[in-house]
Amino acid sequence: MKKPKCDPDAGFSLLEVLVAILIVTFFTAVAMQMVVISAAFKAKAKVYTTATNLIQKDLENIRNLAIQYKFPTLSSVPSAGTITLSSTEGLLNGEKIQFQGTPDVYTLTISGATTTISPVINKVPASNATTVSNTSCSATSANSDKGLANRLMTSPSLVATVSGSATTISGIAYKPVLGANPYVIPTTQKKLWLMRNDSYNFTGSVAPYDVLRVNYLVVKDNNGSPSTNIIAKLSSEVIPYASFQCIK
């Protein structure tokens, strides 16, 4: 006996419908899961990108401050043992100084608004000659106030870039960078803290100690204070422009 042919208008069987529903449900669930994972990765990428941008912005500022850190210049032609400088930043009382373009070395004395040198002027320098500190240009110890890296680190312009209490992470004390903390990521409620540590006596530093290392951390917020949950970190080095003015 021949089997009857399938009726084309009979529709799907219950089993076929159930299988189709399971397949659609499976692929829908997978698609939704991918959307959730994609959103999570996108949010994480936004946090990391923001952290990187915060570090880059402050590092550029530190580099600019290093470029601007120069030895002062004479404001006029010196007479005998009295000199007038554009400033005394980068110079300390009792240091050995030398005017660019002249071979003579003098001892500097700073007393209030009066700046004198000894012995008296031998070869008269140019009226705008740079006054170089041979003492800081030839520093032999990192643990002193003589190296240019230390002087850059303690300069008012650089000190003013950080504020608040230090947070110690992995044995290093980081301070919040002024004007960036806590930083709220736009369109989110997430807050980040940009922290920085400046070091002139790091492992590997060598005479004349003119390299300043800046260490960065970006951490999550913890109820209005920096946490120890690190998002990003970076270490870089800068050299003050004054180092290139040293008379070799």
Image (tube, rainbow, N blue to C red):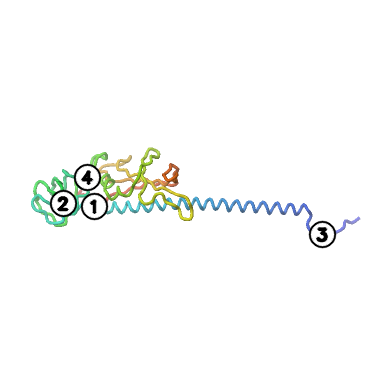
Mark 1 lies on a secondary structure that is: loop
Say how many tags the image has: 4
Between the C-alphas of marks 1 and 4, the distance is 12 Å
Between the C-alphas of marks 1 and 3, the distance is 92 Å
Marks 1,4: beta carbons within 8 A: no
Could you tell which of marks 2 and 1 lies nearer the N-terminus? 1
Say left or right for 120 vs 40: left
Could you tell which of marks 1 and 4 lies nearer the N-terminus? 1
Q: Nearer the viewer, residue 160 or 56?
A: 160
- Which residue lies under the disc numbered 4? 136
Q: Which one is closest to the eye, mark 2 or mark 1?
A: 1
Between the C-alphas of marks 3 and 2, the distance is 105 Å
Q: Amino acid at mark 1?
A: Lys
Could you tell which of marks 4 and 2 lies nearer the N-terminus? 2
Mark 4 lies on a secondary structure that is: helix
Q: Which one is closest to the eye, mark 3 or mark 2?
A: 3
Could you tell which of marks 1 and 3 lies nearer the N-terminus? 3
Q: Amino acid at mark 4?
A: Ser
Between the C-alphas of marks 2 and 1, the distance is 14 Å
Marks 3,2: beta carbons within 8 A: no
- In the displayed structure, would residue 200 be above or below residue 85? above
Could you tell which of marks 3 and 2 lies nearer the N-terminus? 3
Mark 3 lies on a secondary structure that is: loop
Q: Which mark is residue 70?
A: 1
Q: Position of residue 230 (x, y in %)?
A: 44, 44
Between the C-alphas of marks 3 and 4, the distance is 97 Å
Marks 2,1: beta carbons within 8 A: no
- Which residue lies under the disc numbered 2? 99
- Which residue lies under the disc numbered 3? 10
Q: Nearer the viewer, residue 156 or 32?
A: 156
Q: Amino acid at mark 3?
A: Ala
Say left or right for 155 vs 83: right
